[in-house]
């Protein structure tokens, strides 16, 4: 069985661009997250984001960065931090 599909050049170009962009984002995410655990405390998350602990603490409070808290232990999910940063990228 053979399937033949005809598409416009515009569609093919848009599809190639979308795949390329997604692949680039995934690769960048992989490279940037190597060595960091899936859940991080404030100190590690601040280092991951590339800001001081004090700055991260301020950001977390001001923008209500999502976190997981069990008892007195607070953790930030790396994938949610990545999503937050992507949404606020200039």
Image (cartoon, grey):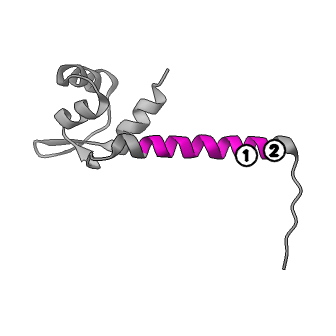
**Does residue 42 sit above or below 89 in this rendering?**
below
Q: Which residue is mark 1?
A: 15
Res. 6 image quadrant: bottom right
The answer to whether 67 appears left or right of 87 in the picture is left
Image disc number at residue 80? none
Which residue corresponds to the image point at 34% horizontal and 43% vertical from the top-left?
33
Q: Is residue 27 magenta?
A: yes
CA–CA distance in space, label 2 to label 1:
6 Å
Task: Measuring from the top left, give residue 39's x and y in whole percent.
Answer: 25, 47
Q: Are marks 2 and 1 in contact (CB under 8 Å)?
A: yes
Q: Where does residue 85 sit, x and y in percent of width and height?
A: 41, 30
Where is mark 2, residue-wise? 11
User: Is residue 9 found left or right of 59 in the rendered image?
Assistant: right
Point 34% across, 24% down: residue? 63
Answer with left or right where residue 26 lies relative to residue 41: right
Vertical comparison of 4 with 28: above or below: below
């Amino acid at each position: 069985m053979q399937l033949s599909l005809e598409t416009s050049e515009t569609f093919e170009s848009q599809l190639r661009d979308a795949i390329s962009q997604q692949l680039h984002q995934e690769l960048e995410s992989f490279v940037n997250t190597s060595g960091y655990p899936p859940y991080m405390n404030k100190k590690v998350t601040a280092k991951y984001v590339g800001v001081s602990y004090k700055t991260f603490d301020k950001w977390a409070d001001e923008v209500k960065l999502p976190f997981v808290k069990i008892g007195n232990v607070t953790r930030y999910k790396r994938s949610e931090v990545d999503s937050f940063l992507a949404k606020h990228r200039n």
